[in-house]
């Protein structure tokens, strides 16, 4: 079965409530939908969430898929997805979200052609349930607490966005903990907003509120600062923006610079990269 067409569509999905972080104010989720169609009419779909701080936009992703990657895909056998991906990497470095959207569409089409769920194609189901965590946007402490309380009632874990100012951020976490009680999982995400010294102070305050994970406390390229926070933090430190590739993850793990890594198919560049 050969790949006949690759189509892309830009999507703009309004948020019901703005997502405010230390570095962004999202009112619309912008992304790219990729559709792969075979000569037998089988369709597969992939998607990438795109915004400037990822280094990619809808425009750049559409361009590289249409002008650079599509010629490496059209006419190829669908079953050759790993070889296609190797050829894609040979002609284009970077652009992980564009690559991930295309690769996901290829795998989706392959699974549909075989009439099996994608998870079966990828080796089978590992677990029947996963913990769902919901982001809570930066807001006034009382408003964040009320939203968190509603989410916790639905059985969701919480990921609190921070502003980058320690006193109001500690108050936000305190109010949320008071609202949801001691049994609810909470992590906080600073989105690179703190320097090491302030992040360490914040981590100690977060520990008092039973926060389990502190995500990306310092700017992505300040790895020495990240390590310093990890060494002195009483709670687990998680890297996000500091890790994009397998090489990034290997370096942080080898040097024991963090306790955890937050990644995903889009950021890593594809299913086989995670």
Image (cartoon, rainbow, N blue to C red):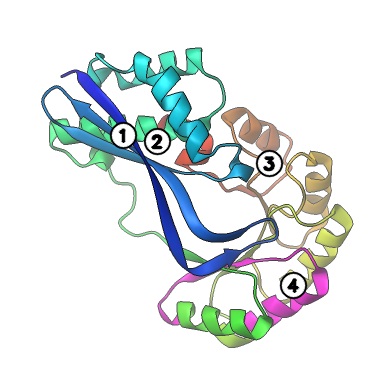
Mark 2 to mark 3: distance in Å? Answer: 21 Å
The answer to whether the residues at label 4 and label 2 have Cβ atoms under 8 Å apart is no
Q: Name the residue under label 4.
A: 169
Which circle, 2 or 3, is nearer the viewer? 2
Q: Give the range drawn in magenta.
A: 153-176
Q: Residue at x 56, y 60 (%)?
A: 26
Q: Going by the image, does 140 lie left or right of 181?
A: right
Residue 101 numbered tag: 2
Residue 20 visible within the image: yes
155 inside magenta stretch: yes
Dot 4: element = helix
Q: Name the residue under label 3.
A: 242
Q: Which residue is drawn at 19% across and 18% down?
A: 2
Mark 4 to mark 2: distance in Å? Answer: 35 Å
The answer to whether the residues at label 2 and label 1 have Cβ atoms under 8 Å apart is yes
Quarter-of-image position of residue 173: bottom right
Quarter-of-image position of residue 129: bottom left
Q: Mark 1 points at which residue?
A: 105
Mark 1 to mark 4: distance in Å? Answer: 40 Å
Residue 39 in percent (x, y) is at 14, 22
């Amino acid at each position: 079965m050969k790949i006949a067409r690759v189509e892309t569509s830009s999507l703009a999905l309004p948020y019901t409530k703005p997502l405010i972080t230390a570095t962004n104010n999202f009112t619309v989720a912008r992304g790219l939908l990729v559709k792969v169609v075979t000569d037998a009419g089988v369709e597969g779909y992939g998607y990438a969430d795109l915004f400037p701080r990822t280094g990619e936009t809808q425009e750049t992703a559409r361009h590289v898929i249409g002008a650079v990657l599509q010629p490496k895909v059209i006419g190829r056998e669908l079953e050759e997805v790993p070889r296609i991906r190797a050829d894609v990497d040979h002609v284009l470095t970077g652009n992980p979200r564009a690559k991930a959207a295309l690769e996901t569409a290829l795998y989706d089409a392959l699974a549909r052609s075989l009439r099996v769920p994608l998870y079966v194609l990828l080796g089978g189901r590992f677990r029947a349930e996963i913990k769902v965590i919901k982001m809570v946007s930066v807001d006034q402490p009382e408003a964040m607490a009320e939203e968190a309380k509603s989410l916790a009632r639905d059985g969701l874990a919480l990921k609190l966005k921070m502003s980058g100012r320690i006193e109001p951020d500690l108050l936000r976490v305190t109010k949320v903990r008071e609202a949801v009680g001691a049994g609810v999982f909470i992590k906080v995400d600073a989105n690179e907003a703190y320097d090491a010294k302030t992040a360490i102070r914040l981590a100690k305050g977060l520990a008092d509120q039973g926060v389990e994970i502190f995500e990306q406390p310092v700017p992505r390229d300040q790895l020495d600062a990240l390590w310093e926070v990890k060494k002195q933090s009483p709670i687990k430190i998680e890297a996000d923006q500091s890790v994009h590739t397998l090489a990034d993850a290997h370096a942080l793990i080898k040097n024991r610079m963090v306790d955890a890594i937050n990644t995903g198919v889009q950021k890593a560049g594809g299913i086989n990269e995670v």
